[in-house]
Image (spheres, rainbow, N blue to C red):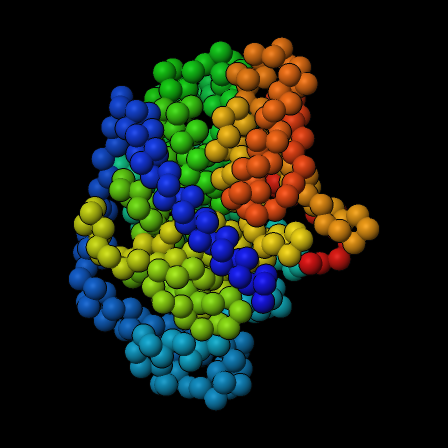
Amino acid sequence: MSGCIILFQFLEVHHKVYFSFNYKFLFSLTVSTMKRPVEGWIYEPDYETMPRDKLEELQEERLKKIVKYCYEKLPMYRKKFKDAKLKPDDIRNLDDVEKIPFTAKDDLRDAYPYGLVASPLSEVLELHASSGTTGHPTTCAYTKNDLKVWSKVMARIYASAGTKKGDVVQNAYGYGLFTGGLGFHYGALEIGATVLPIAAGETERQIRLAKEYETTVLTCTPTYAVYLGEYAKEKMGINPSKDLKWRIGLFGAEAWSEELRERIEGTLGLEAFDIYGLSEIIGPGVSVECTEHDGLHIQEDHFLAEIIDPKTGKKVKEGETGELVLTTLTREATPLLRFRTGDLTTFTSEKCACGRTIRRMERVFGRADDMLKVRGVKFWPSTVEHALLKVEGASENYEIIVDRTADLDTMTVKVEPSKELYKSVNGDLSKLKELSPEIAGSIKSVVGVKSKVVLVPHGSLQRFMGKAKRVIDRRKKTV
């Protein structure tokens, strides 16, 4: 019980930290984008600004169709419905969606490779698969219409951030079985922008081509965006905010903090937008921030979204934090009903100042299965980033090591000082002995966990081109 109390206390702290930085963020945003103003626009206003009652009618119509489609095409869903003593005709309105059993990641793994492909293979034009590092891979298949929908929702993503015909998109997401690269590629083509399909890696070439081709939009993970800025300055003597043309950054695939956004914008001289998606549902394209930066707009005409209590499976009230559950309303090849994403967020249905009526979700700040538990306190790794970036002189490069000694959990956080601070002491970390306890105090205050903070030389921790791996858990038993 105490663990639950601590968790909700942490969630409360998380929201306080998030909102306490709004004013600071807005000021930073104004300064960093002064020379490169961004004006978002609406790609499909008929859907994105549809009155809520009409949108819900459309969702209801599509929900009934997709339920029947899944029941008829996929044995797994027929079995789930039979076990629940449910028939497709029992789903008559949006409230009835709660009658449908959840789909879990294990369901997808068990059905690998083609068990959840509803379309004839002759109609499948593209296949993607997860890495399978935690079990069997999962299959994500696309028909011609699926690719069309994917292109459209990704075009909305670009438009929300102000991308237009004439922009040059530097797509530094990975191409291949990972859906990020191709998703951003298709969306850029749909909107009429020029694509530089450089993919992740070859950092020096990334910077050189950004300058030579005068790319204006950068798409990659936020971690890699930080590394690009760092590499440009330290290795090539290039100041991205002055020497490059980037004005828009579309960053996703990992949880990142508001403080990191400020650093990215200040370093790269662009306006940073958070995007959300997952391969099982469509890839990138589920939701995105508009220029108001007040939550991520969900493409609700294609994805029916719920938020549930991760423990009970019951819906939570709007504004409360819970696990995001998604139903694909228009997917043909691999449709999913009530898929548990594991991602934690909140909803708001208030109309946004940008004019969109589709609901917004708060930035995902962790996954239920990524949560750490140290000495009875539950938290997400991204919260440590919140804490350390509140301390002047700390960089965004860190590593969390959790261990157990004599049945007692310990947490060590390796942190690089900022380059400027590191250079000011000529690399002598002994002269920064006051920084470690200051960072540890911030982590204790924000996260609620006592930790040992170890300063390491600037540039010594691994840099990531894809999703960052920040945690090393050496405990033998799951806690």
Whether residue 428 is situated above or below residue 342 in the rendered picture: above
Q: Quick check: 94 left or right of 264? A: left
On the rendered image, what quadrant is the C terminus found in? bottom right
Give the residue furthest to the bottom. Answer: 85
Whether residue 474 is situated above or below residue 208 in the rendered picture: below
Q: Residue at x 50, y 53 (%)?
A: 10
Q: Residue at x 21, y 55 (%)?
A: 351
Q: Position of residue 400 (x, y in %)?
A: 64, 40
Task: Kindly indicate the quadrant of the structure image that contains residue 166.
Answer: top left
**234, 21: nearer the viewer:** 21
Q: Quick check: 113 left or right of 125? A: right
**45, 197: nearer the viewer:** 45
Q: Position of residue 364 (x, y in %)?
A: 45, 51
**234, 219: nearer the viewer:** 234
Give the residue furthest to the right. Answer: 406
Q: Residue at x 34, y 22 (%)?
A: 245
Whether residue 312 is visible to the viewer of this picture, yes or no, is: yes
Whether residue 187 is situated above or below residue 341 in the rendered picture: above
Q: Count the labels in the image.
A: 0
